[in-house]
Amino acid sequence: MDSRFIDVRVKGDSMWPTLENGSIVRFLRIDFNQLKPDLVVLSEHPLKKNFFIIKRISSIDNDKAFLIGDNPDPNASEDSHNFGRVDVRNIIAMMIED
C-alpha cells in the first residue's frame, strides 16, 4: 500500500454537496508549499488533538489558511469562521478528484 495516500470516511454534512456523509475520499499527502485556494484538504483540527477535518482552502496568507465547509448552511460546518486561520503545516493532504 502506498503511504502517500490516505482514505478517509466523511462524517457529517459540512462538505455537502461536494462530499456526502459516509462516503470514502482518497487524499494525497502533499507538502504545504503545494497548497492553494480551492483545494479540498485534510487537516489536523487546530483545537482538538488527534482530530482531523476535511475543508476547502478559501485563502492563504502568511502561512495561515482560511478553511471553510462547502455546505451553504452556516450552521453546518465548524471551520475557520469558528476557530480562525490554520497553520499550513497542519494540512497534511489534498483530495484526489476522480
Image: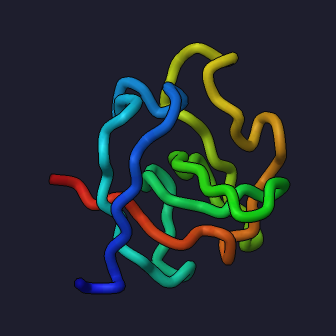
**Residue name at image x 54 percent, y 30 percent:** 14
Question: x, y (%) of residue 1?
Answer: 23, 84
Q: Is residue 81 above or below residue 29?
A: above
Question: x, y (%) of residue 17?
Answer: 36, 24
Question: x, y (%) of residue 53?
Answer: 59, 50
Query: What colour scheme was applied to this rendering of the protein?
Result: rainbow
In the rendered structure, the answer to whether residue 39 lies left or right of residue 53 reads: left
24, 33: nearer the viewer: 24
Q: Is residue 70 above or below residue 64?
A: above
In the rendered structure, the answer to whether residue 27 lies left or right of residue 67 reads: left
In the rendered structure, the answer to whether residue 56 lies left or right of residue 67 reads: left
**Residue name at image x 50 percent, y 70 percent:** 35
Question: x, y (%) of residue 90?
Answer: 68, 70
**Residue name at image x 72 percent, y 56 percent:** 45
| Total marks in image | 0
Q: Is residue 7 above or below residue 28?
A: above
Q: Residue 82, located in which quarter of the rendered image?
A: top right
**Residue name at image x 34 percent, y 85 percent:** 3
Q: Residue 49, located in which quarter of the rendered image?
A: bottom right
Residue furthest toward the left? 98
Q: Is residue 36 above or below residue 81?
A: below
